[in-house]
Image: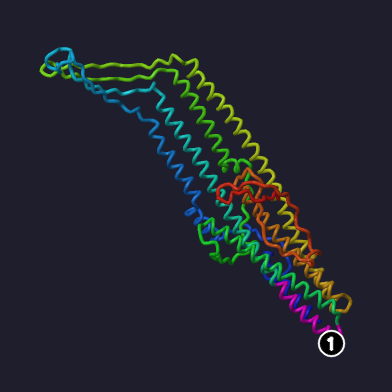
């Protein structure tokens, strides 16, 4: 009996892997130095590898470079034209050199747009580059967020596996002691059966966690263009991940590619409107030519042609109205994006505050109380005043609280990642495996979540996974 109690008490600091306390098993406030720690070097390397190899980011970069090549093209003069001709008197023979009005002609024509049009076209093309850069930024931010979520999910699953392993160690010893007590007539068969039942449930949970770990690895390896089964060895725990400072609404707006793209489109539409107004002005073309006449003196010519926008009411005026309507629509798009972004920022800021309070409540109160309950149940069992099932339920409840605490840390990371991603969609959750069994029912319930469907931008995963707003 005493061996069982000593084993349970010895496991308490080991099972507290989700806590940032060492070596004391009692959870306490998180140190500020840990909260301000730098990112995991492994996480940084995964992000950089994804940036270097992911095809979506390469495609977006190629689109930016393509639009950059269009800027100088927009400012170049229209291509000149070369005209060759022959003017001859009569049809019987070539009269060049014999008749004064018979000659060959070589003419060169260069069009010239109305002053200011070329500069405006270059500005329109340059603003198109800004829009393409916003798209690339969205792909990059989404890719980084996916890697961070995948890495946090991997740490969560591995923390859950360690928690499950430690519970398995206790249950195996408990099953052995229950069997010994039953065989000598000091224990009940129910104690032995319950210990065996819990061990069987742990096997099922272990298989679920193994499958979840392999799936998370496959996602991370796809993001960095590796084989799905390539291992990613980790030494950190979920509690080791950096918790960045909460961004202000202005900082989130400055990071938002959608807002930057919409604002660039407004400026581009304004330039297109100015260009449409200039299209009501005529363009010019200068022609210079020479007419050789054989033995006679050559002739030359110089001319200027002017386009006549005589259909301005049906053409140029309509184009001006078209771009004016477009400008108004894009201005409304900027307001819409900014409003939605402010809403998402406020939602995530609120959730971060609530999750931080919940985390601190677990560290400073709930985990301490759950541990004390487990110790009391073991002491009562040792003194013959409690049952084996009561001690077992207390242990499972404490382990369950540890599991919920890990989920809380994961969702806190999810909110920070979504905030820095400046995503307009719902916050994507960081999901772990299933560690619950019937014995965990005495533990705290997991925080509720509202599920919806959204597309995670930036990567091909974008099939519309279930999102969770914490």
Q: Position of residue 367 (x, y in %)?
A: 76, 64
| Name of the residue lying farthest toward the right | 385
Location of mark 1 (residue)? 184
For label 1, the crowd category at 10 Å Cα-Cα, with few meaning under 14, some 14 to 19 and many 20 or more, is: few
| Magenta residues, start to end | 166-186
Q: Position of residue 25 (x, y in %)?
A: 72, 70
Q: Position of residue 408 (x, y in %)?
A: 71, 57
Q: Which of the 4 image quadrants contains residue 360?
A: bottom right
Q: Is residue 418 left or right of residue 285?
A: right
The image shows residue 54, relative to residue 116, as above or below, that is below
| Name of the residue lying farthest toward the left | 295
Residue beneath the point at 82% across and 68% down: 373
Residue 24 visible within the image: no
The image shows residue 321, relative to residue 437, as above or below, that is above
Residue beneath the point at 61% across and 60% down: 216
Residue beneath the point at 35% across and 27% down: 78
The image shows residue 226, relative to residue 62, as above or below, that is below
User: Where the N terminus falls, by quadrant?
Assistant: bottom right
């Amino acid at each position: 009996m005493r061996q069982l109690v000593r084993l349970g008490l010895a496991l308490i600091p080991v099972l507290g892997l989700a806590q940032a306390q060492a070596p004391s098993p009692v959870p306490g406030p998180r140190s500020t130095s840990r909260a301000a720690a730098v990112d995991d070097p492994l996480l940084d390397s995964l992000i950089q590898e994804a940036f270097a190899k992911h095809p979506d980011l390469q495609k977006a970069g190629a689109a930016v470079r393509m639009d950059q090549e269009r800027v100088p093209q927009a400012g170049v003069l229209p291509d000149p034209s070369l005209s060759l001709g022959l003017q001859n008197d009569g049809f019987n023979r070539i009269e060049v050199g014999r008749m004064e009005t018979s000659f060959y002609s070589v003419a060169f024509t260069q069009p010239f747009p109305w002053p200011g049009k070329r500069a405006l076209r270059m500005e329109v093309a340059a603003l198109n580059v800004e829009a393409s850069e916003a798209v690339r930024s969205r792909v990059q931010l989404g890719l980084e967020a996916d890697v961070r979520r995948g890495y946090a999910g991997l740490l969560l699953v591995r923390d859950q596996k360690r928690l499950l392993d430690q519970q398995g160690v206790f249950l195996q010893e408990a099953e052995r002691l229950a069997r010994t007590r039953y065989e000598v007539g000091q224990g009940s068969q129910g104690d032995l059966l319950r210990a065996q039942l819990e061990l069987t449930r742990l096997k099922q949970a272990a298989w679920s966690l193994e499958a979840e770990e392999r799936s998370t690895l496959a996602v991370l390896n796809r993001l960095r263009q590796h084989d799905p089964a390539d291992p990613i060895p980790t030494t950190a725990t979920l509690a080791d991940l950096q918790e960045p400072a909460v961004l202000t609404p202005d900082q989130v707006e400055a990071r938002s590619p959608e807002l930057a793209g919409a604002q660039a489109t407004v400026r581009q539409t304004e330039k297109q409107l100015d260009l449409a107004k200039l299209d009501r002005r005529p363009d010019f073309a200068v022609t210079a030519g020479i007419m050789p006449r054989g033995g006679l003196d050559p002739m030359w010519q110089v001319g200027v042609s002017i386009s006549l926008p005589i259909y301005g009411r049906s053409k140029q005026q309509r184009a001006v109205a078209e771009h004016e309507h477009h400008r108004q629509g894009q201005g409304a798009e900027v307001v819409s994006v900014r409003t939605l972004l402010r809403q998402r920022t406020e939602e995530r800021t609120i959730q971060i505050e609530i999750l931080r309070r919940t985390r601190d409540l677990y560290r400073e109160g709930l985990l301490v109380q759950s541990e004390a309950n487990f110790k009391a149940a073991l002491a009562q069992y040792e003194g013959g005043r409690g049952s084996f099932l009561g001690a077992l339920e207390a242990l499972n409840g404490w382990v369950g609280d540890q599991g919920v605490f890990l989920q809380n840390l994961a969702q806190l990371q999810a909110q920070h990642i979504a905030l820095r991603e400046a995503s307009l969609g719902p916050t994507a959750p960081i999901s772990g495996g299933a560690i619950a069994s019937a014995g965990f029912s005495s533990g705290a319930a997991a925080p509720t979540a509202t599920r919806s469907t959204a597309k995670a931008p930036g990567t091909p995963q974008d099939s519309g996974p279930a999102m969770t707003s914490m």
